[in-house]
Amino acid sequence: MSYGIVAYGTDNKIAFHSDYSSVVYAGQMSATTSSVQPTYTGDHHVAINGSTRISNYDMGRIIQYDITLDVDFFVPFYCPNHDGQEICIMDVINEGTKWVVNLLYSGADNEAPTVYAFAPLTELPSSAVTLNDNGIVVFDGNSDLVFTDSKRPLRVDDVITITHPSSIKTNSKGSVSLGANSYTTTQHVNFTSNQEATYSGTTTNTSNKLYSIVPSAYGGLAYLNNGSGTIVCADLIFFQVTKQYAFEYKSWASFRGCVRHPRNTTTHTATWKADFGGAAYQYVDTDCGIGGLLGAILGIIAVVFTGGAALAVIGGALAGFVIGEMTAGTTPSIKAYDQDEVFDQNSRPVNLMVTDKSYYGIT
Amino acid sequence: MAYGIQVDGLNITNSAFSVIAKGVLTSATTVTLTKSSYVDVTEFKVIFTPTGVRDTSLEELRPTSSQTSTNITITQPSNGSNHQYLVLGR
């Protein structure tokens, strides 16, 4: 700059500068929905109860926040509800003067994290900035406010680069036992992730720390068990009367890359948590003495895995969410219904920023 | 403090990140910024904020950034969705 003002911190880096806008705290976001754990409930579904969603499907809870903030650029920070909570900011949506965050977290319904909004000071409308009667205000060459002592600037304690593991689960999922006369089932395999990656920072995690990261990695786990055979209806002297049977069981879980910040440590752990799970089962058999129909009958279950049927069911589960398109956010490619997949992970490091409530007067 | 700026009893002794550059990524592109264009700044960080619901069914990828001693490169892949980027510096 040819003229203006610049202030440096004790680390010889800029504290504020009349050429650059500070980033400031703009308010706490409000949870606008109850948290949900959407599961597939369409044709041929196998019910997944609340405890199984956690024990076998490793599901977190999805919740939505919003804030009225007339800015074009926006940075969300979250504060975990408790030590060890896993969190993923899934989506950030701008609707007019409203900003919406979809977030996945581990824990109970009443343990949602708190989310705070930050934005460049130049973006804030004048009505959102009250200048002190005395102190410092700094404007840039366009007469835009770039620093004021009434809005403390974003002070970042640490920036850690995080990459998620290349797989979600490497140990066995177990199996479901099915066969002749298995007309129904309540069984589930175990999709619980066993893969995580830990990164060291320099700042100790406390209950006052705020974190900002939108992980890139996502994926899914899938399980398939199918088979067919012959059942003897009657064993006569010269021949047997038989019937055919066939079954197919499929289950899957969609995962998002999350991050955990263990308190009293300086580490951050990249983990996985499921945002959607489902299981479907179909068993068919013929009448005694009749065969050859099974191929056509079993085709019914295929529709479950085309995506379309599943999406409609997810949409119902998320009916309370403002963003109807949320349904699309829970389908990690059709590939993940058939086999284990991870997307947007390889060579995809993401920056995690750490700051502290106390810098902004947040209680 | 012996010298410096104090506001309302608070010493301004800590550095803070300011917005050096910002933009929107809507299609496959590469943005290159020259560090020397931003006077007095010695540390740069790039953060991305998605703007919309992520359509994972399309195997969408998020943008990436890299730095050398002279440049910052921001890359939006062909199957990326809309993102904002903020280049923060101090």
Image: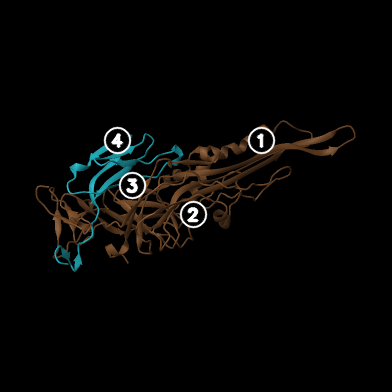
Chain colours: A brown, B cyan
Q: Nearer the viewer, mark 1 or mark 3?
A: 3
Q: Amino acid at mark 1?
A: Ile
Residue at which label 1 appears: A297
Q: Nearer the viewer, mark 2 or mark 4?
A: 4
Q: Amino acid at mark 4?
A: Thr
- Same-subunit check for callouts 4 and 1: no
| Front-lying residue, A198 or A360 | A198
Q: Nearer the viewer, mark 4 or mark 3?
A: 4
Q: Amino acid at mark 2?
A: Gly
Q: Residue at x 71, y 45 (%)?
A: A182
Could you classify mark 3 by the number of other residues whose Cα lies within 10 Å: few (under 14), some (14-19), or many (20 or more)?
A: many
- Dots 4, 1 in contact, CB < 8 A: no
Tag 3 secondary structure: strand
Q: Chain of mark 1?
A: A
Residue at which label 4 appears: B30
Residue at which label 3 appears: B49
- Dots 2, 4 in contact, CB < 8 A: no
Residue at which label 2 appears: A60
- Same-subunit check for callouts 2 and 4: no
Q: Residue furthest right?
A: A237
Q: Earlier in the sequence, mark 1 or mark 2?
A: 2
